Structures are given as structure tokens and as C-alpha cells.
Image (tube, rainbow, N blue to C red):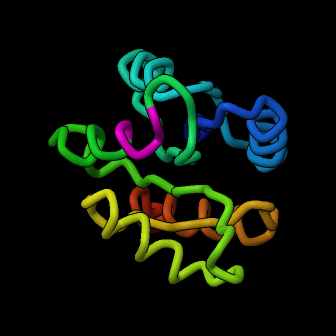
Amino acid sequence: MSAKRILVIDDEQAACLYLARLFQERGYSVACANDGYEAAGRVKQARPDLITLDLSMPNKSGVKFYREMKSTPELSRVPIVLVAAVPGFGGKLRDAERYYVSKHQVPPPDAFVAKPIDPDEMIGVVERLVSERHPTPPQ
């Protein structure tokens, strides 16, 4: 069985490297992209099993990339974890998630993880979403 593929999209190289290492240590195959344009190319090369997506990036923003993914039928079921700092929300993740969804008129994300990233939370979210999309067959 091949490793599940995760695409990490973040314009901060340190964040990409951190998440790539976190996922690789758990057996995932990881690719990184620095903006929405690069990410779109990587998705065309090999469809990921899951995407982590920073919302605030130069060139093509995470919001624009997210909107395009969710409006493309063959890609809309790829789980996407939105990753963003939540300043101004007092660390209230649910409030920040509602804000992004309503302001940018996008469908709700599969998950929303705040920066700074808690590694246990991120791994828990990723494993839940990957197993929901790719359940383990009965033995």
C-alpha cells in the first residue's frame, strides 16, 4: 500500500518544512507549494489525499485556491485543512473559521487549525480526514 499524499501550501518555508517533517515522520508522502499557482500545478501532477492550506499568501491567495478546489467537481472531495493565525479573535478558532467562510463566501473547510500549530491537533485532524476519505478495508 502506498503512502497517502499530503500537499502543504504555505508561503513561509519554515512552516512548510515543519509540516512536511511532521507528516513524513508518520509515513505520509509530502509535497510543498509556496502559493496557489504552484499548488495548482502540484495538484495536476498528482492528486493529494489531503491539503493543508495557509490562507494568507502572495500571488494566488489560499482563499482563491480553496474556492477553485471546491468548485472543481473532480477535486472538490479532496479534504482541505485551512491553517491561519487567528489574531483579533482572542484565539477563538470557531469564530475565525466562521469569519473566513462568511467573508470570502466559501464552503466550510473540512477542518481549521490555528497557528501556531499544535502538532498533536494537526496529526489528529489529518488522520481523521484521511481515514474518512480512505477507510481501512476490513481484514
Residue 114 in which image quadrant: bottom right
> Quick check: 27 above or below 138?
above
Residue at the extreme front of the image, as rendered: 88
> Which is nearer the eye, 115 or 126?
115
How far from the left and from the top, in percent, is residue 134?
A: 42, 56
Q: Quadrant of residue 115?
A: bottom right
Image location (x, y in percent) of residue 35: 54, 27
Image quarter where the N terminus lies is: top right
Residue name at image x 41 percent, y 54 percent: 79
> What residue lies at 50% left-to-right and 67% top-to-bottom?
111
- Give the main secondary structure, helix, strand or loop, of the magenta stretch: helix
Q: Residue 73's quadrant in the figure? A: top left
Residue occupying image coordinates x 70% and y 80%: 91
Q: Which residues are magenta?
A: 61-65
**Residue 116 against residue 96 in the figure, above or below:** above
Q: On the picture, is 136 further left or further right than 29?
A: left
Q: Is residue 1 visible?
A: no
